[in-house]
């Protein structure tokens, strides 16, 4: 497990980085882009040799007594009946459990896509259960990245355009968040870096239909990380992939995690869970460590 701060897009995955992605970002005219124009949260590398008495990083998520109830067909379904969970920055954890057991429900709550029926979910200092809809939108666009089993790419757009969608969504939040969503050349550089990071620098102009399943999931991961999120939430990220592609994606996720990205993945696949440093099982509405 790593506890380093989230990383900038220009640092990592040297083997995947393409031309022009090894140094500082530049404007089209070659002038360096000031750091203040690059997306947050971009953090300095963690200092080497943290002193033994340094306080631990505060938790990223704290869930207490989370229940979720749905009304359905005149009755109710309660997939979560009292979930307690603390996630530290930099963890790579997986959630397994029986089908219909509430794993996707829990991921939606962690992703600020839905609210708990009762209990509390804090992400950093924000209570997701009571935050305004606008605040939840801001959190999703700036702190969270999502990856799904079905990739969820737009088939009429190229890989680069699909990745740019996340930056445009962030830019649409307004001037305070416009750094990555603002200037076109900055967005283009960030998209290039994100695609290089997932090993697809040479596929920027390809549409999803021209890419393998593993490559499509790489594009989806580039879209998820291009805004510099703190957390990647993945719902069966390798569920549609064969074994070789699954391993490629897992190696990519491990690399991102080593750079400080917190990863929470729902999976049915024990081979996926074995690659995480913390495994949880959701059963009968509550979470257990494996
Ligand atoms: N929006 C909804 N309205 C009503 N019921 C829902 C809704 N979403 C999920 N459910 C129900 O909640 C339960 C948990 O569903 P969820 O998708 O979270 O399970 P899961 O563990 O992710 O399942 P699987 O492993 O099959 O994907 C199921 O009984 C499901 O039918």
Image (cartoon, rainbow, N blue to C red):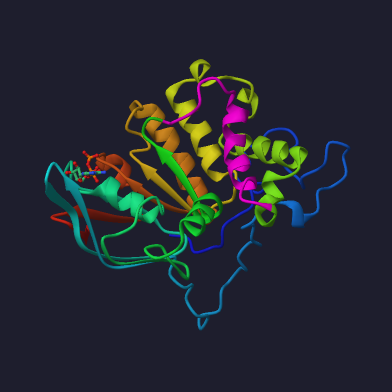
3 vs 133: above or below: below
Residue 4 in the image: x percent, y percent?
54, 63
Residue 249 in the image: x percent, y percent?
44, 36
Res. 250 visible in picture:
no
Q: Nearer the viewer, residue 58 or 156?
A: 156
36 vs 58: above or below: above
Count of marks overlaid on the render: 0
Q: Judge left or right: residue 228 versus residue 121.
A: right
Q: Nearer the viewer, residue 97 or 172?
A: 172
Res. 187 visible in picture:
yes
The residue at 13%/55% (across/down) is 284
Q: Ligand 1: which quarter?
A: top left
Q: Judge left or right: residue 108 versus residue 162.
A: left
Locate the C terminus by quadrant.
bottom left
272 vs 284: above or below: above
- Of all residues, the one furthest to the left in this rendering is 75
Q: Which residues are magenta?
A: 151-174
The residue at 43%/59% (across/down) is 1
Q: Judge left or right: residue 244 versus residue 258.
A: left
Residue 14 in the image: x percent, y percent?
63, 42
Quadrant in the picture for residue 121: bottom left
Residue 162 within the segment the image draws in magenta: yes
The residue at 44%/64% (across/down) is 131
Quadrant in the picture for residue 190: top right
């Amino acid at each position: 497990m790593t506890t380093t701060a989230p990383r900038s897009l220009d640092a990592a995955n040297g083997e995947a980085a393409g031309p022009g992605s090894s140094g500082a970002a530049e404007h089209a005219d070659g002038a360096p882009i000031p750091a203040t124009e690059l997306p947050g949260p971009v953090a300095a590398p963690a200092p080497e040799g943290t002193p033994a008495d340094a306080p631990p990083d505060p938790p990223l998520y704290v869930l207490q007594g989370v229940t979720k109830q749905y009304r359905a067909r005149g009755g109710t379904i309660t997939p979560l009946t009292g979930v307690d969970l603390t996630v530290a920055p930099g963890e790579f954890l997986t959630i397994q459990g029986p089908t219909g057991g509430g794993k996707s429900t829990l991921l939606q709550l962690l992703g600020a896509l839905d609210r708990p029926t009762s209990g509390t979910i804090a992400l950093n200092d924000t209570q997701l259960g009571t935050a305004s809809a606008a605040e939840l939108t801001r959190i999703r666009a700036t702190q969270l990245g999502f990856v799904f089993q079905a990739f969820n790419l737009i088939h009429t757009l190229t890989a680069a355009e699909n990745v740019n969608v996340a930056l445009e969504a962030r830019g649409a939040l307004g001037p305070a968040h416009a750094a990555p969503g603002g200037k076109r050349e900055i967005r283009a550089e960030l998209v290039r870096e994100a695609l290089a990071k997932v090993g697809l620098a040479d596929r920027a102009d390809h549409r999803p239909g021209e890419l393998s399943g593993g490559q499509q999931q790489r594009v989806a991961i580039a879209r998820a990380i291009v805004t510099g999120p703190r957390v990647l939430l993945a719902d069966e990220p390798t569920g549609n992939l064969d074994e070789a592609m699954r391993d490629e994606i897992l190696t990519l996720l491990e690399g991102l995690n080593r750079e400080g990205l917190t990863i929470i993945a729902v999976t049915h696949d024990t081979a996926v869970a074995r690659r995480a440093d913390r495994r949880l099982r959701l059963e009968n509405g509550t979470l257990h460590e494996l």
